[in-house]
């Protein structure tokens, strides 16, 4: 709008910008072209959420069906339970899972002895490479009330046996704790790098001021990685609605389904297995809209509080 | 201001993107219409020569060589299709060449299949392509799959004969618009459609009991099995009764309580009325009985969580006294016996058998195919006596031989191959892994039905319902509705029945269970099947 | 006195975090150890929960069955190629975008960053992206393994924010005064100061390529181009219930073997990455930035 109103003046200033910033613009140009081709061009596929797709007619020729697929999703008896399960698993995972890589990184950073430090780092990041099928298989084995390792240990203390995967009570806990086990070490790598980027002079200065180890962590290490923490937190909040389907699906059984049915597993069963891609797209769009609002809010708050934001 | 700018920018990018995309699409559309008109023209031109090129009987199917482009899945244990003896020979026999460039590996097959539908470039025929019911109806009604019913009656005498003998097949393959868009695999062999009740005769002998015939005797036997270390390994890894999962266990005993398994779900038909029994008192009775014996420790507690592989290892390890499996594929059956369903809970028992047209969507012809008559003759061979043996056994003299009485046999070393018989057979024919256009009968079932399995079936034959309807094909709208309804009913029922059996849900809550199912839409769900049933009559 | 007290405190602190670390190592290491012993055990013993401290029915069958497949070696080769090439492309594009967006003087910086972030949340789905790749004639080429995923927005944003927060603006300004243009500033000032983050992003991208299989499923038909992950999944599939269509006649052993093969596959797939990791790790050690900022 502004562009049209103040025509000539703007043209001049655009020219000026182009002259002085051409290098920056050029740098951005190649990635931007990629974004247009591989992200924005395919976005016509979002229409699928409102259309009954017929390959013979193509995306643009297929008939509109309005909000049919959204209605379909919300007509499910379980839809609110499923939305709640998704959100609550996400919240637990942010609440407990998000700080742990930070703590782990600080521990690695503080550990005396280079070799031990490397050992800790090397071991903690390996679980990231374990496939979901094997992770879930191991969970069933370790948590089995008949012969599971954990129940054997609990048995020594006179507890149990507890069917961790055979009850809706424990499912979310198992899900989040196993995620922490698998991803914390991997997640800590980025904080370790951020810690390595802190100027050692700052530590020296704090030492001279008489700050103990704990105080140095509090006043040098943590402030040094706050921008990284905030960036990752905002990004994480933008994924609240999108929990992957594989793990929940593999850990699901008749007994824990009340808390293990999440949006992605429901869409898999009621949409994708039925070849109903409109339904899957519609639910995906619903998720994206919620994620978008959350990320915008988080971005705004963080900009105010920490002066760090995504955009 | 800022947000406006952002919005304007996104809009801009989207518009550019949209324009680009639209361009691309238009091009394609015009191209495809062009090729369409071209192909119809060609078809018209060829029609006269086509008819004379086609032989209505015998081989070769066509005089002048034609090529069919195949879309399908090369199973994980298959050798590449172009190297299979079966296809080599069949191309020679029929004079129809096959283009296998669209035969895809199993890894990522489903994704590639959806891309194929979206691509607007279709093959001539779909063989072992695992077309699902919704796909068949959707792409049939959209004009991508060719209606086959006229072709069947004219060019598929073998299949026509099957349909005349078993009209229930039609209920499996007829779409709501009356057309047939895809063909099924046929299992006239009862043993291939029924789970046997296998009981461990050694255990019975050790505890000094007879084969149980009534529920009371069964309880007695299971109690006797409990707590004995039959395999002597010092571990409590024996279970009086086991099953792959809780739902299957409930199904097996629903038959004992006199219920059938129509439309491949919890339905039965009484005097033309479709009804479900999952809210009946008799079903509650059954669950109460299962709950009783579960609490006594007579059922493997892992039945609620285990994967099939684990169940298979328990069968092979002879860790269960009574269990359910279609064949003795996973265990040594010498000391097992297949027994009949138990009496005492209902006047008449059933076994919950699958329909004859067990797998649907094993073959289809696309509307792009220029020689549908030849394609139909091509597939019909496999529904005949000779062709069904050919598909299951491969080429005579190379992979198999006939005994003097005409019984087909695999060459030596195939069934007991160290690589596994499926892998060995998958080197020359396409049936291992299922989903193939096959007719499995008493004569050609050597690889899947052992003598013990066939004997076990004898005990069950009287209990197989006369008419078994398969899951009907629904219109897209109905299918969308039923996938939500059934998804909710299934979830709720699985959870509740499992908890009833484990005693985590008291039977005082039965009314809540019934009410909730009604609220989810049980009646609507039943009425959809009623309508489908009425349409079939 | 103050000195002595502090070092006591330091000692206690060291002791506490060392103990915590040992606990963490034990908790993490046991399941990893389990993966190893399960891969050498008898399938029935694994399924039956009979393994706890050492392999039961020790055998190498899972490994011999995997390694006898010749395809595995082309798989390794392809994966290494895709990982190296892909990561290079990733790094160049991400660095360019991250640097330009991190600069306060970048025109339309905020809206452009938003436009990019937007793609993390909304996408057109599998089929339209496939159509783009197909129309560009990239399907069934190695480019389909590296171009459609040339940028990961998440990594890009992490990098951009690191540039923004950890590299003092004054240094970039000083460089400009010294006559550096933007390219020179990026190469001579920003990147040398960002070694740790570049190392992390390299790791993220490389591991992403290493573990990727979905693009290969969609874009590749030529089996000679298959990356390792697809080949491993395929081997597993040959030894699974899906392969036999639920009928295990004559296939029981194979299907069972699949149950321990799962574990062996993890080791076969991730051993090279574990070897590669220490090379990245050295960029994380404290003190790498000594003098850098002052200079």
Image (cartoon, rainbow, N blue to C red):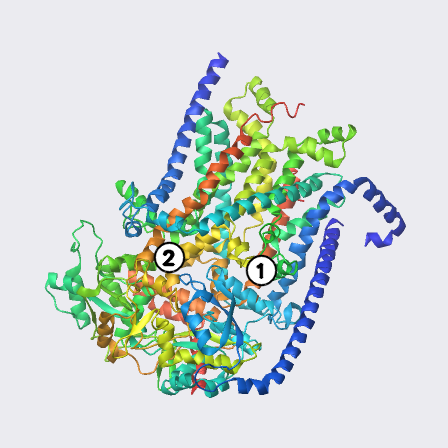
Closest to the observer, B325 or B405: B405
Residue under pointer 2: C239
Asked where in the image residue C235 lies, by quadrant, the reply is bottom left
Quadrant containing the C terminus of chain B is: bottom left
Label 1 resides on the chain identified as C
CB atoms at circles 1 and 2 under 8 Å apart?
no
Residue B144 rendering spot, x and y as whole percentages:
56, 75
In the image, residue B108 above or below residue C45: below
Q: Which residue is mark 1?
A: C126
Question: Is residue B202 found left or right of A48 in the rendered image?
Answer: left
Q: Quadrant of residue B321?
A: bottom left
Could one spot residue B489 in this view of the protein? yes
Between A310 and B46, the one nearer to me in the picture: B46
**Which label is found at residue C26?**
none
Q: Mark 1 to mark 2: distance in Å? A: 29 Å
Residue C80 in the figure: left or right of residue C240: right
Looking at the image, residue A210 lies above or below residue A147? above
Mark 1: few/some/many CA within 10 Å (<14, 14-19, 20+): some
């Amino acid at each position: 709008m502004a562009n049209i109103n103040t025509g000539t003046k703007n043209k001049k200033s655009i020219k000026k910008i182009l002259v002085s910033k051409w290098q920056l613009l050029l740098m951005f140009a190649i990635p931007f072209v990629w974004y247009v081709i591989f992200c924005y061009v395919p976005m016509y596929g979002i229409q699928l959420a409102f259309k009954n797709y017929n390959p013979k007619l193509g995306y643009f020729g297929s008939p509109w069906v309005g909000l049919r697929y959204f209605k379909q999703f919300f007509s499910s008896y379980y839809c609110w339970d499923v939305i709640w399960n998704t959100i609550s698993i996400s919240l637990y995972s942010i609440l407990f899972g998000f700080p742990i890589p930070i703590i782990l990184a600080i521990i690695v950073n503080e550990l005396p002895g280079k070799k031990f430090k490397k050992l800790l780092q090397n071991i903690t990041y390996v679980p990231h490479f374990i496939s979901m099928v094997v992770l879930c298989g191991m969970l069933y084995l370790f948590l089995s009330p008949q012969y599971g390792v954990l129940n054997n240990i609990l048995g020594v203390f006179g507890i149990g046996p507890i069917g961790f995967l055979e009850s809706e009570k424990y499912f979310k806990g198992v899900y989040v704790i196993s995620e922490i086990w698998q991803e914390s070490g991997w997640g800590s790598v980025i904080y370790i790098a951020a810690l390595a980027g802190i100027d050692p002079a700052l530590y020296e200065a704090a030492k001279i001021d008489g700050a103990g180890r704990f105080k140095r962590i509090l006043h040098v290490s943590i402030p040094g990685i706050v921008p990284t923490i905030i960036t990752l937190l905002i990004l994480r909040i933008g994924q609240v609605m999108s929990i992957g389907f594989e793990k929940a699906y593999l850990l699901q059984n008749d007994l824990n389904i009340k808390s293990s049915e999440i949006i992605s597993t429901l869409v898999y069963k009621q949409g994708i297995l039925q070849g109903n891609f409109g339904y899957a797209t519609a639910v995906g769009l619903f998720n994206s809209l919620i994620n978008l609002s959350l990320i915008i809010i988080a971005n705004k708050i963080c900009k105010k509080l920490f002066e760090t934001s995504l955009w | 201001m800022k947000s406006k700018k952002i919005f304007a920018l996104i809009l801009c990018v989207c518009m550019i993107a949209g324009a680009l995309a639209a361009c691309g699409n238009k091009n394609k559309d015009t191209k495809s219409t062009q090729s369409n008109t071209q192909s119809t023209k060609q078809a018209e031109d060829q029609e006269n020569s086509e008819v004379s090129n086609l032989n209505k009987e015998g081989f070769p199917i066509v005089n002048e060589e034609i090529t069919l482009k195949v879309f399908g899945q090369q199973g994980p244990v298959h050798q590449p299709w172009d190297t299979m003896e079966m296809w080599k020979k069949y191309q020679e026999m029929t004079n129809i060449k096959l283009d296998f460039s669209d035969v895809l590996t199993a890894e990522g097959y489903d994704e590639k299949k959806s891309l194929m539908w979206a691509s607007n470039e279709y093959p001539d025929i779909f063989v072992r392509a695992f077309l699902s019911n919704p796909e068949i109806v959707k792409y049939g009604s959209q004009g991508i799959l060719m209606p086959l019913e006229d072709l069947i009656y004219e060019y598929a005498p073998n299949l026509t004969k099957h349909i005349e003998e078993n009209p229930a097949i039609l209920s499996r393959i007829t779409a709501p618009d009356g057309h047939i868009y895809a063909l099924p695999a046929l299992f006239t062999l009862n043993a291939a459609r029924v789970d046997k009740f296998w009981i461990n005769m050694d255990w019975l002998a050790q505890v000094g009991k007879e084969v149980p015939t009534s529920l009371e005797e069964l309880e007695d036997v299971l109690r006797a099995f409990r707590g004995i270390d039959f395999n002597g390994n010092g571990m409590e890894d024996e279970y009086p009764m086991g099953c792959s999962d809780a739902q299957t266990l409930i199904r097996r005993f629903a038959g004992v309580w006199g219920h059938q398994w129509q439309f491949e779900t919890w339905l039965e038909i009484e005097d033309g009325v479709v009804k479900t029994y999952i809210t009946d008192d008799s079903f509650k009775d059954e669950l109460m009985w299962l709950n009783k014996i579960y609490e006594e420790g007579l059922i493997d507690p892992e039945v609620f969580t285990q994967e099939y592989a684990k169940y298979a290892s328990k069968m092979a390890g002879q860790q269960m006294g009574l269990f359910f499996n279609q064949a003795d594929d996973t265990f040594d059956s010498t000391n097992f016996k297949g027994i009949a369903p138990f009496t005492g809970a209902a006047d008449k028992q059933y076994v919950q058998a699958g329909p004859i047209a067990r797998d649907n969507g094993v073959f289809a012809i696309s509307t792009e195919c220029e020689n549908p008559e030849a394609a139909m003759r091509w597939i019909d061979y496999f529904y005949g006596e000779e062709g069904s043996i050919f598909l299951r056994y491969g080429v005579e003299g190379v992979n198999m031989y006939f005994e003097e009485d005409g019984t087909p046999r695999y060459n030596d070393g195939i069934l007991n191959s160290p690589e596994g018989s499926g892998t060995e057979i998958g080197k020359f024919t396409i049936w291992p892994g299922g989903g193939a256009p096959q007719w499995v009968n008493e004569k050609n079932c050597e690889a899947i039905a052992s003598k013990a399995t066939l004997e076990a079936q004898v005990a069950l034959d009287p209990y197989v319902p006369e008419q078994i309807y398969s899951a009907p094909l629904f219109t897209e709208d109905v299918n969308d509705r039923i996938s939500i309804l059934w998804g909710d009913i299934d979830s709720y029922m699985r959870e509740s029945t499992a908890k009833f059996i484990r005693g985590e849900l008291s039977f005082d809550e039965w009314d809540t269970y019934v009410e909730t199912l009604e609220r989810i839409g049980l009646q609507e769900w039943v009425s959809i099947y009623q309508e489908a049933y009425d349409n079939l009559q | 006195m103050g000195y002595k007290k502090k070092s006591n405190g330091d000692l206690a602190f060291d002791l506490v975090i060392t103990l915590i670390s040992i606990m963490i190592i034990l908790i993490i290491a046991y399941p990893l150890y389990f993966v190893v012993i399960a891969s050498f055990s008898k399938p029935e013993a694994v399924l039956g929960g009979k393994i706890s401290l050492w392999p039961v029915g020790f055998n190498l069958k899972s490994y011999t069955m995997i390694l006898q497949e010749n395809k595995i070696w082309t798989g390794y080769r392809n994966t290494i190629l895709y990982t190296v090439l892909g990561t290079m492309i990733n790094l160049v594009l991400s660095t360019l975008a991250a640097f330009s967006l991190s600069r306060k003087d970048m025109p339309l910086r905020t809206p452009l960053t938003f436009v990019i972030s937007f793609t993390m949340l909304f996408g057109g789905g599998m089929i339209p992206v496939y159509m783009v790749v197909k129309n560009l004639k990239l399907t069934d080429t190695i480019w389909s393994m590296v171009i459609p995923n040339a940028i990961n927005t998440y990594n890009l944003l992490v990098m951009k924010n690191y540039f923004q927060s950890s590299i003092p603006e004054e240094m970039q300004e000083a460089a400009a005064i010294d006559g550096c243009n933007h390219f020179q500033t990026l190469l001579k000032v920003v990147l040398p100061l960002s070694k740790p983050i570049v190392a992390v992003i390299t790791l993220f991208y490389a591991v992403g390529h290493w573990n990727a299989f979905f693009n290969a499923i969609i874009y590749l038909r030529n089996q000679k181009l298959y990356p390792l992950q697809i080949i491993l999944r395929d081997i597993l599939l040959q030894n699974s219930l899906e392969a036999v269509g639920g009928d295990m006649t004559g296939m029981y052993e194979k299907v069972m073997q699949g149950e321990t093969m799962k574990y062996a596959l993890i080791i076969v797939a991730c051993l090279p990455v574990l070897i590669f990791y220490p090379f990245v790790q050295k960029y994380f050690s404290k003190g790498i930035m000594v003098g850098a900022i002052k200079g």
